[in-house]
Image (cartoon, rainbow, N blue to C red):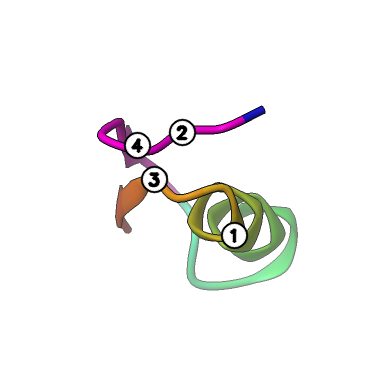
Amino acid sequence: MRLHNKRALITGGSDGIGLAIAGAFLREGADVLI
C-alpha cells in the first residue's frame, strides 16, 4: 500500500512492534509521528 501524503500517529513506537510498524509506514511514504 502506498501512503504518500498520509500521516500516521504511532503510540509506543520507540520499541518493539510499535517501532516495526513505524518503519513500515515510513517505507510506504507516510509522515510518522511517534
- Dot 4: few (<14), some (14–19), or many (≥20) neighbours within 10 Å? some
As measured in the structure, the alpha-carbon distance from the residue carrying label 2 to the one carrying label 4 is 9 Å
- Dot 3: few (<14), some (14–19), or many (≥20) neighbours within 10 Å? some
Identify the residue under disc 4: 8
Residue type, label 4: Ala
Above/below status of 27 relative to 10: below
- Dot 1: few (<14), some (14–19), or many (≥20) neighbours within 10 Å? few
Q: In the image, residue 1 lies at what x, y percent?
A: 67, 27
Identify the residue under disc 2: 3
Please report contact status of discs 2 and 4: CB closer than 8 Å, yes or no: yes
Identify the residue under disc 3: 30
**How many marks overall?**
4
Magenta segment range? 2-11
As measured in the structure, the alpha-carbon distance from the residue carrying label 3 to the one carrying label 4 is 7 Å
Q: In the image, residue 30 lies at what x, y percent?
A: 39, 45
As measured in the structure, the alpha-carbon distance from the residue carrying label 2 to the one carrying label 3 is 5 Å
Please identify the quadrant where the C terminus is shown.
bottom left
Q: In the image, residue 8 lies at what x, y percent?
A: 35, 37
Identify the mark nearer the N-term, 2 or 3. Answer: 2
Above/below status of 21 relative to 23: above
Tag in front: 3 or 4: 3
Identify the residue under disc 1: 27
Name the mark on residue 10: none
Residue type, label 2: Leu
What's the residue at 33%, 53% (across, down)? 32
Please report contact status of discs 2 and 3: CB closer than 8 Å, yes or no: yes
Above/below status of 11 relative to 3: below
Residue type, label 1: Arg
Q: Nearer the viewer, residue 5 or 23?
A: 5
